[in-house]
Image: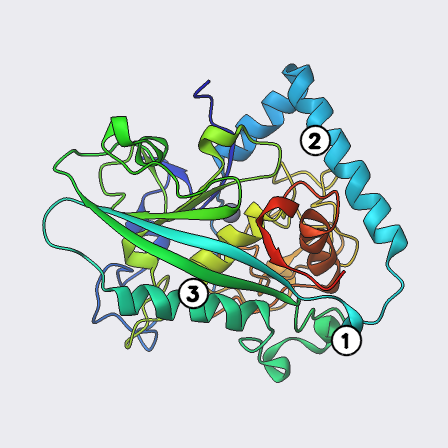
Amino acid sequence: MRKLVLACSFAFVLGACNKEEINGPTSATDPEANQSVSVDNNVKKKHYCFNEERYLERLNNDQEFAERIAAIEAHTEAYNASLKTEKADLPIYTVNVAVNVIHRSEVPISRESIRRQIAFLNQAFSGQDTDRAAVPQMFRRFIAGDTRIRFDLKRIRFRRNQKRFTNAEDLFFDVEGGIDPLNPDTTINIYISNAENFTEVVFGVAALPGTEPEVDHIFIDVATVGPTPSPGLFSEGKVLVHEMGHYLNLFHLPGLQTENCRFDDRVGDTPNSSELYGGAPELGSQSTTCGSQDMFMNYMGVSYNFIVEMFTIGQRNRMRATLAPRGPRRNFVQTSNE
Ligand SMILES: [Zn+2]
């Protein structure tokens, strides 16, 4: 079974919304790019994550899948209901990760850069990337801070291959020219490659819990690996933070359908929203939907990397539910004092 169920980040249909449009006047692939370049602060583009549409379609048409997701949601609800401990008492969940790099000619990224990226992932999940003072006051009480989830990089592997990959899925298989995942029963596999020939323009894609094991992995474009010394608009390392959020069962803030206030992200403390913001939005009427200010600085939005900087407590709990005993991602937890 090669059906792919992904929640995608920054996935767009070519022609409808290309990368240049998203990146604004500078390019995420340009190592010289930096955030001091002027950006259109009024930018409020419509972004559709087509894989979310696929997810919704499958939820409506594939009974087995729908039952799996319903079981995961029931577990998440039960976990949330059982939460009585203070944050400081929450056990730390350390999960195993492996990074697989598939490249055409020269190795496009060093082991050191990958280690820095995983170190940043740990910083973000520890709350160290969140500048509390920069978060609008109305949202500060929702800041997750330390999620008490950690990532232990077990291995980095490279494969050189001249194939022009047109989708992330093929990267997951030796026979397709990619790399079979490392210990997929116990390890989260992150794939890095160049997405320039992909049929859908993506910076990253990630499977949500409930996905078939064969394709239950994360992909990020090599240009997003960070933090880079001169950070570009999408190369501060936050694309992987976003994708890991998906992998641990977070949706984008508008839920499975934008432009629709009836859909939510199944997290209680993120405001209901009908817009997935790109660029550099500002507070006020231009970033207000469904009757309230939207939280466009949340990691699960697709604003520029220098804009997004927080998970909420509700998101933290939803992610932790996947790693808790009987959770759908429990198999990746290496250590826990539960
Ligand atoms: Zn996404």
Q: Which mark is residue 35?
A: none
Q: Earlier in the sequence, mark 3 or mark 1?
A: 1
Q: Which mark is residue 88?
A: 1
**Label 1 beta carbon within 8 A of ligand 1:** no
Q: Which residue position is annotated with label 2? A: 69
Q: Position of residue 97 (x, y in %)?
A: 46, 54
Colour setup of the view: rainbow
Residue 57 placement, left or right of 81: left
Q: Is residue 73 above or below residue 122?
A: above
Q: Are marks 3 and 1 in contact (CB under 8 Å)?
A: no
Q: Amino acid at mark 2?
A: Ile
Cα distance, mark 3 to mark 1?
Answer: 23 Å
Total numbered badges shown on the rendered structure: 3
Neighbours of disc 2 within 10 Å: few (<14), some (14-19), many (20+): some
* 1 or 2: tag closer to the N-terminus: 2
Residue 332, image x, y percentages: 57, 49
Instruction: Please tell me which residue is depicted at 79% across the width and 53% down the height of the picture.
Output: 268
Indicate which disc residue 118 carries: 3
- Residue behind label 2 places its C-beta within 8 angstroms of ligand 1: no
The percent coordinates of residue 168 (x first, y second) are 35, 36
Residue 130 in percent (x, y) is at 58, 76
Measure the C-alpha gap from mark 2 to mark 3.
29 Å
**Which of the image's four quarters has the C terminus?**
bottom right
Amino acid on which the number 1 mark rests in the picture: Ala
**Vertical side of 7 occupied by 31: above or below:** below
Q: Is residue 210 left or right of residue 96?
A: right
Residue at point 71%, 78% (across, down):
137
What is the distance, in whole Å, between disc 1 and disc 2 at their CAs? 30 Å
Q: Amino acid at mark 3?
A: Ile
Say which element carries label 1: helix
